[in-house]
Image: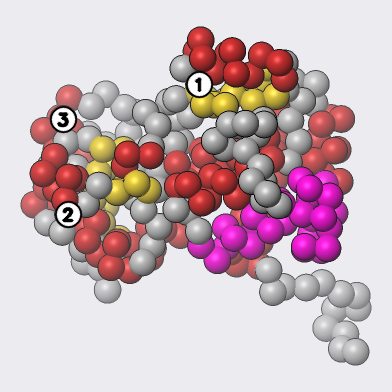
Amino acid sequence: MPQFGQITPAQAFRLIGTPEAPVIFDVRTAEDVAALPRMIPTSRHLPHTAIAAMTDLPGRAIVACTKGKKLSEGAAAWLRSQGWQAEVLEGGTLAWEATGLPMLLLAALPAPGTPWVTRHRPKIDRIACPWLIRRFIDPTARFLYVAPAEVEPVADRFGAIPYDIENVTFSHRGEKCSFDALLDDFGLHTEALDRLATVVRGADTDRHDLAPQAAGLLALSVGLSRLYRDDLAQLDAGIALYDALYRWARDGHEEGHDWPAGRKE
């Protein structure tokens, strides 16, 4: 059991990927980061010496150092004094790694707030990828939708990462789609995300045999594109859709529904 003011890695990971996810501050020293150059998904590296100067509005936070001791305890206490609901990650990043939970390779991470750009009028992959980025990689990422011919020029001029177009890093690879590419390159494979990826792949590549939910996701995606002319408004609605799909993939995939209730064949 975690002590007062602490949260276990398993408990923390269940919050990541949901709309209620806390801010995660990684307060490890530069030497400790060099020894384990990987980050907890969505975490933000902020040296403990910078906590006092932070101007973010208070909210819920998890603070992680290497072992969950003095640096995270002190940083969490300071945050609480500023109105934050702050908890210490029990056992720190070493415990997270030992639990086998996903960690992002630091060298592969874009700077916080980096824009991502793709084709306008998004469906499926071009909504699923922003959901994955925002929920598991960078909560502050920006998403740009532009004319197909302008994706790469915009990426070049605005320092954005292009995705879901041909001949870029995060795109279709063989039978897999761009969502799969993000999972592969950021090391985000979990049972729930892999289950969700199968549905996305089936809907995005017209292979509804991969998962029975793929046809439903296609129908909902087409419906969203008809409801919204504004791509960013459609993205906001789509984020809620993928939040629900993720919770299905994580917690509800074995649940069915029948009428009358409780009927047995």
Give left or right: position of 34 versus 257: left
Upstream in the sequence, badge 1 or badge 2? Answer: 2
Upstream in the sequence, badge 3 or badge 2? Answer: 3
Please tell me how crowded label 1 is: few (under 14), some (14-19), or many (20+) other residues with Cα within 10 Å: many
Q: Secondary structure at mark 3?
A: helix
In front: mark 1 or mark 2?
Answer: 1
Q: Which residues are magenta?
A: 190-218
Kindly indicate the quadrant of the structure image that contains residue 193.
bottom right
Residue 7 higher or lower than 130, as above or below: below
Identify which amino acid the numbered label 2 is placed on. Thr
The residue wearing badge 1 is 160
Magenta portion: prevailing SS class: helix
In front: mark 3 or mark 2?
Answer: 2
The numbered disc on residue 66 is 2
**Residue at figure coordinates x 32%, y 34% from the top left:** 58
Give left or right: position of 82 versus 24: left
The residue wearing badge 3 is 50
Residue 203: x and y, percent?
78, 50
Kindly indicate the quadrant of the structure image that contains residue 8.
bottom left
Give left or right: position of 247 versus 214: left
Give left or right: position of 180 versus 54: right
